[in-house]
Amino acid sequence: MSTRLEDSNTSREISLSRYFRRYTEKEDLLVLVESEEDIPFWSMLLGRKSEHYARIDVTNLKVRDAESGEEQTYKGKDSLMKLTGLGRSKCIAVDRDYDSLVPGYHSYSSRIGSDPYILYTRFYAMENHKLHPEVIGDFFSDMLHKDVAIDFRSILGQLSLAIADFVLLLIVYERRCAQPGNPERCLREITIGKLYSQILAKPFRFNNYEADFQDLGESLQTTFGTLLERYRPEVEALREELSVCHQKREEDYWKLLQGHTLYGVMKKLFQGVLLMKKREEEQNIRKQFVGEELAEAISAYNHTLGWSSTNILSKIDETFTLHPHIAANDWEEHFEGMIEKIRENQET
């Protein structure tokens, strides 16, 4: 079998399974994604259009070596964007990153938004969609089995304001680096890695997040303040561009933050919220029971949750990955129409 990327995970593979299924006029659809963690998210979205297809497979890019017969998984956006032979029965789904904001960010940036068989996120990455303030409450309902009334829009807005100048600075710098012959290509005074590692190194506590966000802003100012002033005119121009052309206010800059970094910040806050709500419920139980009945009631409550204080971080990861939600306007204004275009276009 060929080991060329474009010959792997073909739509023919799932079409062959029709011999074992009831005949239907509907087409099969194969969608290749960047990693295993992306599968539940894109499966959830495409499942909303399942009535149009006989079968939808969302999977990673896999190639079987012709000599050894071993199957190798290719992860990441770069591997997917090398694929050819896309069409109504075979698509790829990727994170948008900064491809639409930085001209020439990658060699394939121009295909994002122009190739109808490339599905892409509306914000930086799928994590940003899963952390939309409209759906964060659903995440807590999944874990606590009850509604949580917390103003997550305000939290994300305050985070955005704290990092706004430095997200803009990063994008300005990336634009300069994308220009051939530009000296910044070698200097790399600010990078995604440098900025986001500093953000993730900070503690974020739910009972103190406002002060923690302020400390983060001051820390970033100490590290990148001189660079920020050097490019201040371009930063301000980009701020205006985002507002006028992309309808993004500074309070919305969490949508531009790298997905893993945004989740890393919010995960720390989630831990605090969940433990606080768990303690509150246990206090209510203590008011109702004593002795052995109390122990049994608390044990039953913890059993209902399916997690404890000791494994809370892994349970957050599991729930966040496997039970994605989507905000109504995200679906209606971006994903629904993009997925519909697959069926409207002819095979390439």
Image: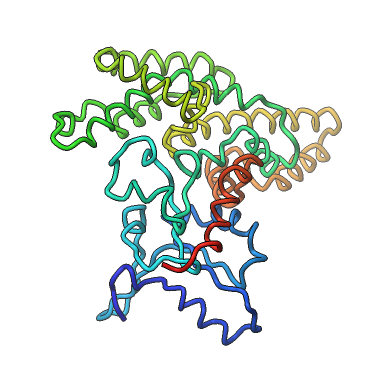
Image coordinates for residue 306, horizontal then vertical, percent? 67, 48
Give the quadrant of the C terminus. bottom left
Say left or right for 123 vs 21. left
State the residue in front, 93 or 151.
93
Please give the name of the residue rendered at 83% of the width and 33% of the height, measured from the top-left corner.
290
Q: Is residue 329 above or below residue 224?
A: below
Residue 132, position as x, y percentages in the image: 58, 35
Q: In this view, does 31 lie to the left or right of 149?
A: left
User: Can residue 35 be spotted in the picture?
Assistant: no
Residue sitting at 59 percent across and 58 percent down? 46
Q: Considering only vertical position in the picture, is 64 above or below 235? A: below
State which quadrant residue 64 falls in.
bottom left
Which one is in front, 51 or 166? 51
Question: How many labels sit on residues?
Answer: 0
Asked whether residue 214 appears in the rendered view, the answer is yes
The residue at the point 44 percent across, 32 percent down is: 256
**What residue appears at the point 66 percent right and 24 percent down from the top-left corner?**
151
x, y (%) of residue 292?
Answer: 81, 40
Q: Is residue 228 above or below residue 127?
A: above
